[in-house]
Image (cartoon, grey):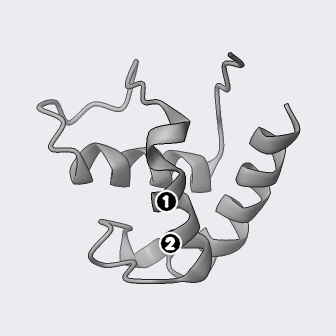
Amino acid sequence: CALAVAIGGSARALSKAIMRYSNYPLDKLHAFEYELKDYDWFMQKVIAGESLKELFISTDRFDTIKEGILIFDMILKFI
């Protein structure tokens, strides 16, 4: 099991969206963890640009989130 610690705007935006989607009880991203395999479908929807608003992606990320998550996804599949 590989551990991926991500930094960068797209990875941060993805994690915040997953927090909101999963009704995480805190509003702090610090120390938030999730199983990537459980949210691969989520990442694929973001990459496809599907329902970004319904996936809790911030509107100020709409222009770059797809490309950023595609790169993040490729790196995760490589490690």
Judge left or right: residue 35 versus residue 16: right
Q: Residue furthest right?
A: 78
Disc 2 residue type (three-letter): Lys
Mark 2 vs 1: CB contact within 8 A: yes
Picture coordinates of residue 2, whole percent (x, y) = 71, 19
SS category of the residue bearing label 2: helix
Residue 24 position by quadrant: top left
Disc 1 residue type (three-letter): Trp
Residue 52 position by quadrant: bottom left
Identify the residue at image location x=58%, y=48%: 11
Q: Provide the residue designation for mark 2.
A: 45
Identify the residue at image location x=66%, y=19%: 3
Q: Quadrant of the C terminus?
A: top right
Picture coordinates of residue 10, whole percent (x, y) = 59, 56
Judge left or right: residue 76 versus residue 30: right
Picture coordinates of residue 23, whole percent (x, y) = 15, 44
Q: Provide the residue designation for mark 1.
A: 41
